[in-house]
Image: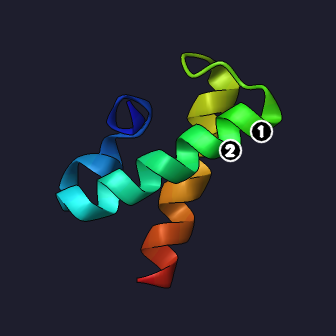
Amino acid sequence: MLQNHHPSAAGMDADDLQMLQRVFDTVCERRGIAKNTAPATDVAADLIAMFQHAA
């Protein structure tokens, strides 16, 4: 699901994607964001950017 929101996610390994997917799911659930929406795309982009800057 996360990969559908941000093309940069395609280059990450499976463990990283699984972890980011769990975070994405949790953030969307807690904020009441439907996963196939523009706000979900923003969440995905923010998560990926934070992950890439931390690496």
Answer with the quarter of the image where residue 30 lies.
top right
Q: Residue at x 48, y 69 (%)?
A: 51
In this view of the protein, which residue sits in the foreground, 15 or 45?
A: 15
User: What residue type is disc 2 on?
Assistant: Val
Dot 1 falls on a residue whose secondary structure is helix
* Residue 38 screen position, x and y as percent: 64, 22
Q: Quadrant of the N terminus?
A: top left
Q: Residue at x 64, y 38 (%)?
A: 42
**Numbered mark located on residue 30 in the image:** 1
* Residue 5 screen position, x and y as percent: 44, 32
Q: Residue at x 33, y 52 (%)?
A: 18
On the question of residue 12 being in view, the answer is: no
Dot 2 falls on a residue whose secondary structure is helix
User: In the figure, 52 relative to 9: above or below?
Assistant: below
* Residue located farthest toward the right when viewing the structure as drawn: 31
Q: Quadrant of the C terminus?
A: bottom left
Q: CA distance from mark 2 to mark 1?
A: 5 Å
In this view of the protein, which residue sits in the foreground, 30 or 41?
A: 30
Q: Which residue is mark 2?
A: 27
| Image side of residue 9 versus residue 25, left or right | left
**Callout 2 touching callout 1 (CB < 8 Å):** yes
| Image side of residue 45 versus residue 55, left or right | right
On the question of residue 54 being in view, the answer is: yes
Disc 2 crowd, CA 10 A, few/some/many (<14, 14-19, 20+): some
User: What residue type is disc 1 on?
Assistant: Arg
User: In the figure, 18 relative to 27: above or below?
Assistant: below
